[in-house]
Amino acid sequence: MDYITRRSVATQGVVGIWITSGRNPFLEALGVRVSGDSIDRTELTTALSDLEISLELPAGEKLPAELVERALITHAACELKTRMVHFLKGLGR
């Protein structure tokens, strides 16, 4: 399930858990889907906007996951996940 769908489901009061592989811990903490080695710009910008995180992103619809992962390193993965879960739970209230 991508982040935008998960956000939509959260408005109904249901917040599921992420199944992670551990390969991209910061992106997984945000709950964005990594397809191959890239992520969808729309999905990522929505997640970053929800948490009020600003990042310099390269142009294009598909972004290199490794590049974004390195940009998020200033945040702890567990902090990002906690913030994201609280945000999504707040949508259901």
Image (tube, grey):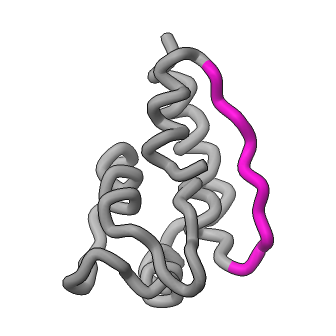
At x 59%, y 69%, the residue is: 26
From the top left corner, tell me how far across and down residue 50 is, in percent: 35, 44
Q: Is residue 47 left or right of residue 58?
A: right
Q: How many marks?
A: 0
At x 47%, y 21%, the residue is: 11
User: Eyeballing the image, is 13 above or below 63?
Assistant: above
Give 63 or 87, whichever is nearer the viewer: 63
User: Eyeballing the image, is 63 above or below 27?
Assistant: below
Which quadrant would residue 76 be assigned to in this image?
Answer: bottom right
From the top left corner, tell me how far across and down residue 64 is, in percent: 44, 87
- Does residue 7 appear in this view? yes
Does 20 appear in magenta? Answer: yes
Give 81 or 22, whichever is nearer the viewer: 22
At x 54%, y 44%, the residue is: 84
Q: What stretch of residues is rendered in magenta?
A: 14-23
Does 36 appear in magenta? Answer: no
From the top left corner, tell me how far across and down residue 61 is, in percent: 28, 75
Give 54 or 92, whichever is nearer the viewer: 92
- Does residue 80 appear in this view? no
